[in-house]
Image (cartoon, grey):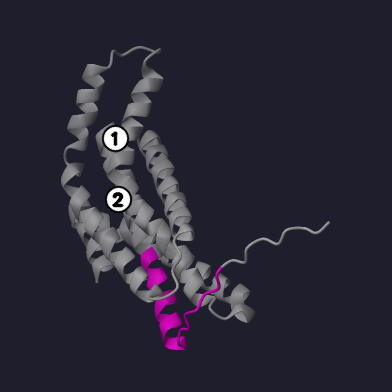
Amino acid sequence: TTLAESEPEPQMTETFTKGEINMAVWAIALSGAVAMLYEVAWTRLLGLAMGSSSNAFAMMLITFIMGIAVGAWLIGRIRIERNSMNWFAWLEILVGVSIILTMFTYERLPYWFAKLANVIERSSENYPFYQVMRGLLSFAVMIIPTTFLGMTLPLVSRISTAELARTGGSVGRVFSFNTIGAVLGVVLTGLWALPNLGLARTFALGAALNIC
């Protein structure tokens, strides 16, 4: 008896110049910074709407991580054999556009949460249901941008590992730049953007960076 051979996975047919790879790596660093800008701003937004910073952070983190996971899964299912750099550019634009479109719902969140509290009878039995409904509202305004964000990191990793022999070092470089960008994004958002620009302009700044 012989073991059936599994179908080989398609190999990347694109090649990239060193300049293109460097540009993608620096872009994913900026993308990481903007992602953390959104994360800090969403936490602040939900904290104001919910009146509880711990609940707000939990809701934001659940939705953010879920969106990143869904985006990574989706990009893994898409067979991209050419124009990977264009894919990355369009994904960043879609992040910015989705933020702009959902920004108009942010000012309504406190009203929706208050309306929800009035509709659902306040009791210990209904509290889990109430929390789930608040989570679904938070999920609705954040899931699309976070899904697009989740698609960018695996795509840049794919671009940077076009040369199989340098896979380990290339992936490490992508993740290190993305992480450094994320750290800077948290610091700049918390210490400069939110105090000086406010929530709306902070979101607008992030959207502008994505689109540009």
Amino acid type, callout 1 = Leu
Q: Residue 212: x percent and y percent? A: 24, 72
Quote the CA–CA distance across marks 2 and 1.
Answer: 16 Å
Residue 20, magenta (yes or no): yes
Magenta span? 10-31
Residue 42 to residue 27: above or below = above
Q: Which residue is mark 1?
A: 137
Question: What secondary structure is found at the residue carrying circle 2?
Answer: helix
Return the disc, 2 or 1, that comes first in the chain's sequence: 2
How many neighbours does mark 2 have within 10 angstroms: few (below 14), some (14-19), or many (20 or more)? Answer: many
Residue 56 or residue 169, whichever sits in front: 169
Residue 99 to residue 19: above or below = above
Q: Residue 154: x percent and y percent? A: 48, 64
Q: Which residue is mark 2?
A: 41
Question: What secondary structure is found at the residue carrying circle 1?
Answer: helix
In the figure, is residue 162 to the left or right of 51?
Answer: right
- Identify which residue is drawn at 39% across, 43% down: 63
